[in-house]
Image (cartoon, grey):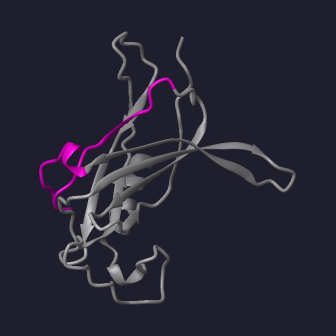
Amino acid sequence: MRGWLFLFLTMALAALPACSRRADGRFGGDRQRPAPSAKDTEIFRVVCFFPPNMWKSFDSAGDRNPEGFAFVMYLISGKTGKGIYADGTFRVELYRYGEADRNGRRQRDLVFDTAAPMAQIARRSPTMLGEGYQPYVFWGDLQIYGDDIEVVVKYESPTGRTVSSETVHVKVPPRKA
């Protein structure tokens, strides 16, 4: 039930009017989106859905330990308010939480990042949300089993403008024997 609630809330967030988020990623303030330059894309939001079965084993041994995950991503157009295919670069950053300090704050450390051209990311069939992608992230032998991590997905336009997704907090499944 929680998975459906998360999916509904994420879809509702994606449907919010673009004026609710400024170009710098913060809410409120500037109600107009900056016009893209002649060679830039019109992407103003990255929306990601992480399904309950997101964890994937990519190794040839066929064990059940995840070495990555898959998800669904939409690059939302400022013109149509729906997902579109775009040129540019896809980036993913994974942060691990450390131990809490005496003030209760947990340190966040970058443990993995990857990038690829958008042309190499698998495309999904269009849906009511528009055209989308189905990327996967393979982190190899990174030992983050059972860790709390944050995932940040970024789209970088051909001109270098970066649009980030909302930060998603997930717990990597524990290592299986």
Q: Position of residue 106 (x, y in %)?
A: 73, 50
Q: Is residue 101 left or right of residue 86?
A: right
The answer to which image quadrant residue 46 occupies is bottom left
Q: Is residue 158 above or below residue 144?
A: below
The answer to which image quadrant residue 71 occupies is top left
Q: Is residue 145 magenta?
A: no
Q: Is residue 169 above or below residue 10?
A: above
Prevailing secondary structure class for the magenta stretch in the rendered image: loop
Whether residue 138 is visible:
yes
Whether residue 1 is visible:
no
Q: Quadrant of the C terminus?
A: top right
Q: Position of residue 136 (x, y in %)?
A: 32, 38
Please name the residue shown 44% across and 32% down the image. Answer: 139
Q: Is residue 148 left or right of residue 47?
A: right
Q: What range of the chain is rendered magenta? A: 118-141
Q: Is residue 78 left or right of residue 25?
A: left
**Farthest left residue in view:** 125
Q: Is residue 79 above or below residue 97?
A: below
Q: Position of residue 11 (x, y in %)?
A: 32, 62
Q: Is residue 139 magenta?
A: yes
Please name the residue shown 25% across and 76% down the image. Answer: 78
**Farthest right residue in view:** 102
The answer to which image quadrant residue 30 occupies is bottom left
Q: Is residue 96 above or below residue 76?
A: above
> How many numbered marks have been drawn onto this rendered protein structure?
0
Q: Position of residue 112 (x, y in %)?
A: 51, 40
